[in-house]
Image: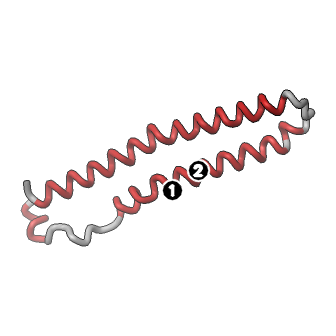
C-alpha cells in the first residue's frame, strides 16, 4: 500500500463521516426539535395560555431551540469541513503525486 492510497482512504473516510452526519444526525436533531416543540405546545395547552401565546413566546422559544440546534450541528461538522479544505502537511511529495 503506497502513501497516496492511504491519503485517498483518509479523504474518503472523512467524506463518509460528513455524509453520515448530514443525512443521519441532522434529521435526528430536527426530529428532536419537532418533538420538543410538540411537547412544549401540548404542555402549555393544558394551562390555557390564550391565543396570543402561540404567536409570541411560543415562536420565540421555537426560534431559540432551532438556533441552538443549528449551532450544535455546525459544531459537529466543523472539524470535517476544516479537514477537507486544509492542506495535509505530511502528505506525499510532488514526485509521488505525479506518479499516482
* Circle on res. 36: none
* Circle on res. 75: 1
Q: Residue at x 58, y 38 (%)?
A: 30
Q: Where is residue 51 in the image (x, y as percent from the top left)?
A: 91, 33
Q: Looking at the image, do the residues carrying marks 2 and 1 touch, with CB atoms under 8 Å apart? A: no
**Colouring:** secondary structure
Q: Which residue is drawn at 9% across and 70% down?
A: 95
| For marks 2 and 1 on the same chain, the one whose residue lies earlier in the sequence | 2
Q: Position of residue 13 (x, y in %)?
A: 28, 49
Alpha carbon of mark 2 to alpha carbon of mark 1: how far?
9 Å
Rate crowding at label 1 as few (under 14), some (14 to 19) or many (20 or more) other CA atoms within 10 Å: few
Picture quadrant of residue 71: bottom right
| Quadrant in which the C terminus is drawn | bottom left
Label 1: element kind = helix
Picture quadrant of residue 87: bottom left
Label 2: element kind = helix
Q: Where is residue 54 in the image (x, y as percent from the top left)?
A: 83, 37
Q: Residue at x 14, y 54 (%)?
A: 5
* Circle on res. 70: 2
Of residues 40 and 3, the one nearer the viewer is: 40
Picture quadrant of residue 50: top right
Left of 24 or right of it: where is 29? right
Rate crowding at label 2 as few (under 14), some (14 to 19) or many (20 or more) other CA atoms within 10 Å: some
Give above or below for 8 relative to 41: below
Amino acid at each position: 500500500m503506497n502513501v497516496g492510497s492511504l491519503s485517498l482512504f483518509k479523504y474518503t473516510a472523512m467524506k463518509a463521516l460528513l455524509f453520515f452526519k448530514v443525512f443521519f444526525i441532522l434529521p435526528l436533531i430536527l426530529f428532536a426539535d419537532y418533538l420538543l416543540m410538540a411537547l412544549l405546545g401540548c404542555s402549555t395547552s393544558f394551562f390555557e395560555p390564550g391565543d396570543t401565546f402561540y404567536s409570541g413566546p411560543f415562536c420565540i422559544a421555537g426560534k431559540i431551540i432551532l438556533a441552538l440546534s443549528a449551532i450544535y450541528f455546525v459544531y459537529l461538522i466543523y472539524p470535517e469541513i476544516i479537514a477537507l479544505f486544509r492542506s495535509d502537511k505530511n502528505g506525499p511529495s510532488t514526485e509521488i503525486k505525479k506518479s499516482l
